[in-house]
Image: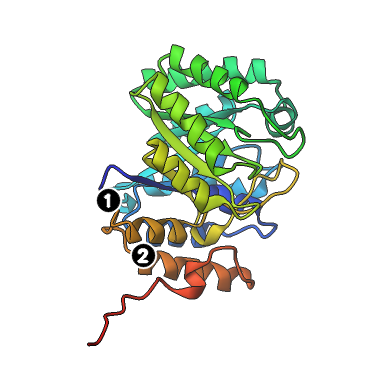
Amino acid sequence: MKNLIIHEVGIRDGLQAEELVVPTEQKIQWIKELAETGVDIIQAGSFVNPKKMPQMADTDVLFNYFAREENKLKNIILSGLVLNEKGLERGMACGVEMFCMGVSASETHSLKNTGMPISEATERIIAMAKSVMGSGKKVQVSVQSAFGCGFEGKIPEEKVLSLVNKFLENGIRDISLADTAGHAVPDQVERLFGAIIKSDPATECVCHLHNTYGLGLANTFAAFRAGVRSFESSFAGLGGCPFTAIAAGNVATEDLVHMFQKMNLRNDIQLNKLIAVAKEAAEYFKRELPGVIYKTGKIPEISKIN
């Protein structure tokens, strides 16, 4: 089932939460290893102010490196996150293939993350997305804090769907719902994604979930049941938005792939190679990371002996 898309975001969303700044050479090595696993998209960084987020200071360098003919990755899309027009200009200048951008459904999170109220952020992001589409490149727009906010608590579902409708009205069909604070529960996930798909079946829904309260994989399966076929995850479960109340890791890519492969989906992805990258990360950061399968291994296939 190749149309089930795995978008690996650990190099960006994972490493941005780490105090230790990972050298460019190590990031390049991990990107190459992740590309060999068979995932579909790798998010290589975000074009943000390096003074505010030094972990992402080398994003331009990374994209320029992989843009060179001798370093190009086969059958992999490299995505980059942008928050504003300046970041978009930087991404365009170094050949980003896919731009990810978003608007928070939480006023408090929006101000902390981008310095803009929701209304201004929405207007600017829509204009940026149209600019990217006009250039012939791929764009994905997200609604952040879609399932709850670490500062404000519950976010009305109507508010989330209103933002989604604004994107749809402007011709943006690749839309992610991000559980920035990790507050999502399965019935809520299924209900929200189901409402979007019902209103516009042509929408390519994307699921970005955090495992703050241990519900990451359950919510992922709920999204799958609702019809979502594109999932963002991070090797070893690294990550967490530094601008939310409790920064916790993403759903681990190897855990996600293990679940899907047990459902006989995406058997083309090299799970053992994903596990190896997760183990490398744990050794690099010298601590146990949130992912599970890199520690336990996959469920063994045991044949009964009669």
The residues tagged by marks 2 and 1 sit, at their Cα atoms, a distance apart of: 18 Å
Check disc 1 and report its element: helix, strand or loop. Answer: loop
Circle 1 residue? 74
Residue farthest to the top, as pictured: 169
Using the image as rendered, state which of residue 220 and residue 174 is in the foreground.
220
Hey, what amino acid is under mark 2?
Leu
Q: Residue at x 45, y 40 (%)?
A: 223
- Tag 1 or tag 2, which sits nearer the N-term? 1
Residue 135 sits in quarter? top left
Q: Residue at x 36, y 76 (%)?
A: 300
**Would residue 106 be seen by someone viewing this image from the given angle?**
yes
Q: Residue at x 62, y 40 (%)?
A: 180
- Badge 2: residue crowd in 10 Å (few <14, some 14–19, many ≥20): many
- Badge 1: residue crowd in 10 Å (few <14, some 14–19, many ≥20): few
- Give residue 14's position: percent from left, percent from top: 57, 53
Residue farthest to the bottom, as pictured: 306
Q: Quadrant of the C terminus?
A: bottom left
Check disc 2 and report its element: helix, strand or loop. Answer: helix
Answer whether labels 2 and 1 touch (C-beta < 8 Å): no
Hey, what amino acid is under mark 1?
Lys
- Give residue 299's position: percent from left, percent from top: 39, 72
Q: Residue at x 32, y 45 (%)?
A: 4
Circle 2 residue? 271
**Would residue 36 be seen by someone viewing this image from the given angle?**
no
